[in-house]
Amino acid sequence: MTKLDEAIKLASWYHKDQKYADEPYINHLERVCQNVKDCNYGEDYQVVAILHDIIEDTNCTPLEIEKQFGVVIRDAVLSITHKKGDDYYSYIENQVVQNPISKVVKFADIMDNWKNSYINIGYKRLQKKYENAMKVLMINWNKYN
């Protein structure tokens, strides 16, 4: 079993009862992963794409990620994890862009969220949020290189 297969299995289990709009949550994670793959990023990037919401939205711990996937994956997942109460745009500007894997995955995540906001009527209010998030990400892309 590849690391990506293991990540899909873990994310499917942790997100099993969650929905993204009207679909199983894993569908969103797989679309983000496919976007990353389509841009020719390797397995570590794809694994982080699958796991990018696992700490933020479930009770999975960083230690569990580290034990199964190592510190590189753990650090990228932690970098993309938005902590409750933190300003969303500051989180992107100061946290996400610090990790080369997390900023690529966040780009793919924002694109899927933005697309979803146009498809699903109930999410129209989020269009501007994702447009602004993409601007913040792009402006700060090379901040820590």
Image: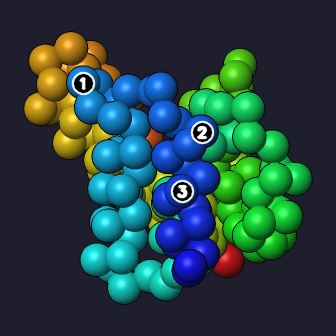
Q: Give the structural element (helix, strand or loop) at label 3.
A: helix
Classed neighbour count for the residue bearing mark 1: other residues with Cα under 10 Å, few (<14), some (14–19), many (≥20): few
Give me the C-alpha separation between circle 1 and circle 3: 21 Å
Q: Nearer the viewer, residue 127 or 60?
A: 60
Residue bearing mark 3: 9
Label drawn at residue 14? 2
Rendered location of residue 136, percent (x, y): 48, 47
Residue flagged by tag 3: what amino acid is it?
Lys
Q: Are marks 2 and 1 in contact (CB under 8 Å)?
A: no
Please state, as top left, top right, bottom left or bottom right, where the N terminus lies in the image.
bottom right
Residues at marks 3 and 2, CA–CA distance in whole angstroms = 9 Å
Indicate left or right for 3 with 137 as reference: right
SS class, disc 1: loop
Q: Residue at x 52, y 72 (%)?
A: 4
Mark 2: few/some/many CA within 10 Å (<14, 14-19, 20+): some
Residue 142 appears in the picture as rendered: no
Check disc 1 and report the residue beneath it: 22
Nearest the eye: 6 or 62: 6
